[in-house]
Image (cartoon, rainbow, N blue to C red):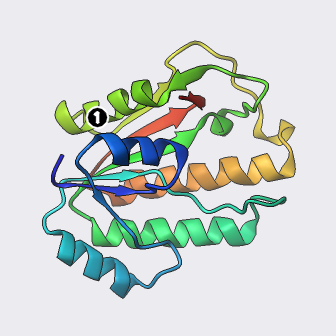
Amino acid sequence: MNNTVLIGATGFLGSYIAENYPVKICPVRFEDSLEDWKKFATDAGPIDHVILLSRACRKATPRRSISTMLLEVEGISKILQVFAHSHIVYTSTKVVYGLTDNDVRPMSRKQITDYMLQSIYEKPINTVVNLPDENFSERKLTDLSAEHQLYAQTKLILETLIKNCSNTYSIYRIWDITN
């Protein structure tokens, strides 16, 4: 994992990975310039894998808006340019299925990380995996609140960017994370 970059090391899942695995932590943020991203990539050396956990949202309500969506799309676009030849491991969400906090299926950070590390060690190419991988009833996005709809749409746009602009990828649609 020495050639693995972690983007989003301060979050709940990212802090667990940063504390337990030898990854290079990226200090560059979505709003930073493409030049800042290029400099980090050059300084980091050859990167085989990028674990992408970061997202753009506010702490206060509304947490997500058009501006956070655009910031996240712009940030992921820079990452895909800079790490064009790296395998992208991206975390998405159950919300893309119209599911919310009423549909709880927790997995531990360790369990989720173990699945994600399979992308690095076993090299499955271009996969989308649900965590947990269980049967569920998909709902319409239009049944979600406006903020959840925006969140789901943002994640779907980003998944599409990653699928179309990365060399290889693994996308994990995560339900709920516990310790």
Q: Residue at horizontal 53%, vertical 23%?
A: 107
Amino acid beneath label 1: Leu
Tell me if residue 140 comes above or below residue 53 in the rendering: above
Q: Residue at horizontal 34%, vertical 87%?
A: 35
Pointer 1: what residue? 117
Q: Position of residue 169 (x, y in %)?
A: 32, 46
Q: Position of residue 4 (x, y in %)?
A: 23, 53
Dot 1 crowding, Cα within 10 Å, few <14, some 14–19, many 20+: some
Q: Position of residue 154 (x, y in %)?
A: 63, 55
Tell me if residue 135 comes above or below residue 117 in the rendering: above
SS under mark 1? helix
Q: Is residue 64 left or right of residue 178?
A: right
Q: Residue at horizontal 33%, vertical 71%?
A: 81
Between residue 119 and residue 60, name the one nearer to us.
Answer: 60
Q: Residue at horizontal 57%, vertical 28%?
A: 178
Between residue 165 and residue 147, name the one nearer to us.
Answer: 147
Between residue 141 and residue 170, name the one nearer to us.
Answer: 170
Between residue 1 and residue 96, name the one nearer to us.
Answer: 1
Figure quadrant of residue 43: bottom left
